Amino acid sequence: MAHTEWRDAPELPDFSLLKRLARDQLIFLLEQLPGKKDLFIDADLMSPLDRIANVTILKQHEVDKLYKVELKPIVSSSDQLCFLIRPRIQTVKWISDLVNADKVAGRFRRYKIIFTPQKFYACETVLEEQGVYGDVTTDEWNFYILPLDDDILSLELPEFFRDNFLEGDQRWVTTAGSALHLLQSVYGSFSKVYGIGRCAKMVYESWRELMEEGEQRTRQPEFAKVFLVDRDVDFVTPLCSQVVYEGLVDDLFRIKCGSVEFGPDVTSSDKSIKVMLNSQDKVFSEIRNEHFSNVFGFLSQKAKNLQTAYDKRRGMDIQQMKAFVSDELKGLKQEHRLLSLHIGASESMMKKKTKQDFQELLKTEHSLLEGFEIRECITYIEEHINRQVSMIDSLRLLCLLSITENGLLSKDYRSLKAQYLQSYGIKHLLTFANLRQLGLLEEQQAGETLTVMESKVGKLVNDKTVGKLTDAFSSLAKKSNFRALSKRLALVPKSGEEYDLRVPRDMAYVFSGAYIPLSCKLIEQVLERDGWTGLEEVTRMLNGQEFAVTGAPNPRNKTDAQRIVLVMFLGGCTFSEISALRFLGKERDTYYVKQIEYMVNIKLSI
Amino acid sequence: HHYIGATWHVLKIELYEMGWNLKDGLRECLVAAAPYGGPISLLKGHNRRSPSARPQLEIYSSSGLPLASFPWKSGVVKQLGWTVSDDLLCVQEDGTVLVYDLLGGFKRHFSMGNEVSQSQVLETKIFHSPYGTGVAILTGALRFTLATNIDDIKLRRLPEVPGLQGAPSCWAVLTQDRQSKVLVANGSHLFILDNTACTPVTPPGLSPQASSIVHMCVSFSYKYLALLTDSGHVWMGTSNLKEKLSEVDTKIKTPPKQMAWCRRPKSQQPSAVVMWDGLLIVVGECKETIQYHLDDDSILVPELDGVRIISGTHHELLQEVPGACEEIFKIASMAPGALLLEAHKEYEKESQKADEYLREIKEQSLLSEAVRQCVEAAGHEHEPETQKTLLRAASFGKCFLSNFPPEQFVSMCRDLRVLNAVRDYTVGIPLTHTQFKQMTVQVLIDRLVYRKLYPLAIEICRYLKTPEYQGVSRVLKHWACYKVQQKEESDEVIAKAVSVKLADAAGIFYSEIATKAYESGRTELAIKLLEFEPRSGEQVPLLLKMKKSPLALSKAIESGDTDLVYTVVMYLKNELNRGDFFMMLRNQPVALSLYKQFCKHQEQDTLKDLFNQDDDHEELGNLYVKASYKEQRLEARIALLQSAVDEYYKAKNEFSAKTTEDEMRLLRFQRKLEEEKGELLVGFSLHDTMTTLLSVGLHKHAEQLYKDFRVPDKRFWWLKLKSLAEKEDWEELEKFGKSKKSPIGYLPFVEVCIKHHNKYEAKKYVSKVTPEQKVKAHLAVGDMEGAAEAAIERRNESEISTVLSRCSATTDHLLMERLNRAKATAVKK
């Protein structure tokens, strides 16, 4: 048993090193502004910062008061102001206004902006245009990666997806490249890099340039392989409702920076409680990857065990009791606390998710994935919109419909859009424009229907002509080709078969056995084949842009490191995908470390 | 070897016989020689003021080989001097300082300030400190002005010296406590001038018979000070004037020409050199002095570890004899080094005496000391033959030692090869080993580069295995920068030559070379050179400088570095007129999208212009819609929406246009109702508006919206159903249900009643539900019998299972049996 355990979990690199590096640099930067100072922090940096340097550490380095950046006038009385911010134009504009206001008031202060993870020229331009360039000193805090868990690293860049895929602004590409470079310089070279997607390719290029510029340090690598994947390679997965425990917790309570805030309905008190969700939580780590239908049973069993452990007290003599209190009680109490929280959470989950509505939502999603009873699905979506069930869920369904069907028929598109606007207002014209820009929700063009026709005809002729015909039309629009992909990669298991969710047979369990996440399937296939050979058809349907590069030579001895794969999702990933990869890791005797831009949970409105 | 002096040892060696041919020697010349064996500059007849007879400025190497020569055309020069990076400074009477490189190329000029130019320069000293090269000036107004670093000029005017009537008898610049100060003697009074004060000081133990200090000099390290009094005494002590080291009577009372320290670092003995016409006296710790006769006019050049004496014909070095050399070469020395040298000599002669000497050293276990002495002594020797003899002896001694660390020997051999190469007459840099170690290889390479001795510099880098970045590549870069300035060669030839030479050198930035080419007016060559630059990011700034903006933009985009693209875009924005700027962006989608991002936050109007230019009416429409949501006033809001409508029509997007028109209608409707009924409605979606209307009982108005806005029947039914149930108006609900056939079926009726805990009402609708939904309806009202009935009737297995799962084993026992039986015969679905 011990042996298998070892096989399943090779020693992961010590990611706390990254935190230490970041902390040391931050302290260095704070000391560049000697004396007492007030620190203003971007709201979305607060939790990550807390993981790196808590308030005590900040106070030790003469930070007097801490404020959240709210883009409003400030009340600080300090003579030194330090701003720890993401390089965003708005924030810099706000700082410029502060400085100018001080100038008008004849007040002299020292200002320092620390940009993280890097500064952008655009921000400096703003300082210049606002005439405060000389009044403010700027610095960079190269805090690229936050380890969220033993096997999850995050760049904590919520705007990555929007900037890169919607706005066509690739400024975060170099950030991702630098993050990889940092990992490489701390943990050694990678032997192989695979990737798919335009952004992945650019990130790799930027990383490669950094490698060529810097000195090469050869050391025993702690990762074997890297897999870079663009979020837009697989939009389907994040559009599906999550049903593994961790995913559901995220859907319902929103996991932020590795922790979640459980409201009064979970804690059964009048207070909310903030809980860290990671492998340190012994209860959570056992249920996080489980399908939620199993969770409750598991928790009640756990509760029974706990009771038995408590019951041991009965009939103890004084000595034994003493030992019990000092050795076990604290652990039991801790477990007790966590257990009751998770029971609370899963209760509220059951309440919401076993309802008819949710069951029907899942059924519709599964039908869409299978390409089955599409008309009924459309009717269901229409009703969903008409009844104002959920603004986000309706959009999610619409997108799923569009992607799985290669766009909506003009008639349906217009009618559904009109209904949606009636329900939620015409500001969503912009939402729809954005979704179309992303290729998430599209109206079939005249040309496209032709292709559908073409392929239908093609089936009758022969496969070769189909290839040619689709090639001819592939320039038309970026199509998801989900149906064909699903078939080739067997993403949707044959319906009708019973799927025992307690004993998962493949990654499909994360979606109740209805669908294997495309992204994870691709990773599995590429690693299995050690490249893209044999997947030509698949990559063609995914618009190409795939690559595989051999890096540092593999050390002879098969160390643990050889089984560790770093998967980087450019544009975020879902907890379902993480669970799927953990499952794959167990199956394939490989371990996956995920690096993500940010946890996404489909959010695409204006 | 000429060892002079009995009590302490000073050694004078000849460095070069000067290669120059000066008619009158150094007479009537302004001379400056750079330390560390640097170049020498001469200005003959510098006092001549007539334009017909311009003085000639000449620059020579230390061996007297000409480096440059040109007639002086500027003002009257008061002082020449060299900077730490081998640039020549010419300080003019008016306080202007002209800077030339050592090949006579003019670099720049700077002024020492108005005050100096008004009262003119009386005297000047050029000094070196850790902060660079400085210039100190005594003006005609008897005030001192000082700049510590000529590369970052901050002029400082020092406080007045009390009681100063004419030029002080002597003065010097000191660097103390990270500050440059001036030490001034006025008669017998001595003052220290710093930024804020003029402080009188007294050297401890200065002979009382002196009535005036006539000369002073500070050691190379600024640690020691020597004063010469009118009584002919030389006082030597620390420059902080806390300690006296010695005082010696030269017995000469005429003022000297020059005085300099001649002292090794870490040496215990102070020694200074005083020079008069034809006479040189070395003074030290004891009363005795050493005297030399000088044939010719000479100058003294103080060095870190001695003093050089340059005359019209010769170049000599005067040094305290290094300890190791003294030990070895002293007559009848029994020092281990001396014995080892002797042993080796005998060994060469194949004499057995070698063994005797060796044994003698070994018996005292001093062999490693002997080797060390020989190696060290070799370093101090200028004659290659002597160096070799000593090194051979050391090598010989090493053979009898195990575990003797080889580094010292090896690096000394290397250093000496380099030193001998640069000391060569043709190069003319007479560095001592001590100086070489102090200045470092990097600086030596720089000096060679300044002299354009590229091949030698590269040779040395390779020989010393200097890392490529700091060594060969750096030299090549300098070479290339020089090459691109050669006017006579064509762009093609130069570009080719540069690329061939630099091909495999690491860490070369072609952009730097291209910048040089551009600065010397060769834009085309610069562009050609930039093509070799693999980092497109490096190309961009220069391209911008050269006004090659389109190329800069595409290079920036190629680099994949968004920040760089931004830089170019913002530059272009300021550089071009709006039309051209937009035009350029139009062809570069990446740049365009970036700029749009920027505009979104900073310049909304520009964004509009951009869309206008592209006839992107769709985006314009969206922009107006977005703006309408930020607008509080209704009329303005509607006006914005109207603009959106116009744009959507232009974009042939009827759908959006119609929808937006509907919105305008809705807003007007909402406002009207708000005014009439006081119900807050403006800004609600159609759905929310209707919900509100129904909830407050404005059914008519809701119906009006239903008709006017083509609201689908289904939505209306849902809305009404929900609102009636919420108000628990069951009667109205029943009426509504019967008004016509429900487009949403009757199951929602059942469910909504149950939701409001009214089973009685719910049951009313169960019978109207379609067969497919019957089971669900029965289950909803908790009628197990009915559900079972319906399921069995429909012979639907899954429905039967559903009912079964809801049955309780205790109460519905019979029902379950029935269901199970039916299930067995049911059709699978």
Image: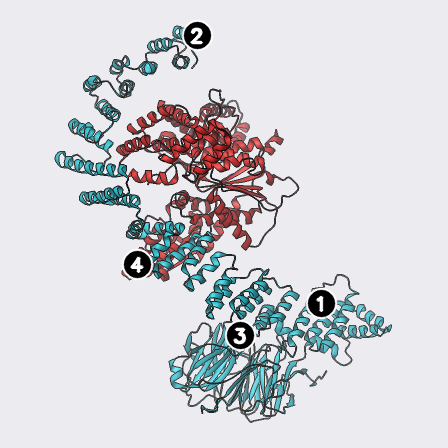
Chain colours: A red, B cyan
- The label nearer to you, 2 versus 4, is 2
Disc 2 marks which amino acid?
A: Thr
Q: Chain of mark 3?
A: B
Of the two numbered discs 3 and 1 on the same chain, state the one appearing first in sequence. 3
Q: Chain of mark 2?
A: B
Residue A521, horizontal then vertical, whole percent: 51, 33
**Residue indicated by mark 4:** A100
Q: CA distance from mark 4 to mark 3?
A: 44 Å
Left or right of residue B240, residue B660 in this image: left
Disc 4 element: helix
**Residue indicated by mark 3:** B84
Above or below, B496 relative to A278 = below
Q: Pick whichever, B635 or B145, lies toward us.
A: B635
**Residue indicated by mark 1:** B409
Disc 1 element: helix
Q: In the image, which disc is placed on residue B825? A: 2
Q: Pick whichever, A304 or A483, lies toward us.
A: A483
Residue A583, horizontal then vertical, whole percent: 52, 31
Q: In the image, which disc is placed on residue A406? A: none
Residue B381 lies in quadrant: bottom right
Disc 1 marks which amino acid?
A: Phe
| Callouts 2 and 3 close, C-beta under 8 Å | no
Identify the residue at image location x=59%, y=41%.
A561
Q: Name the quarter where the N terminus of chain B is drawn.
A: bottom right
Disc 2 element: helix
Above or below, A493 relative to B432 = above
How packed mark 1 is, by other alpha carbons closer than 10 Å (few <14, some 14-19, many 20 or more), is: many
Q: CA distance from mark 3 to mark 1?
A: 30 Å
Whether discs 4 and 1 lie on one chain: the answer is: no
- The label nearer to you, 2 versus 1, is 2
| Callouts 4 and 3 close, C-beta under 8 Å | no
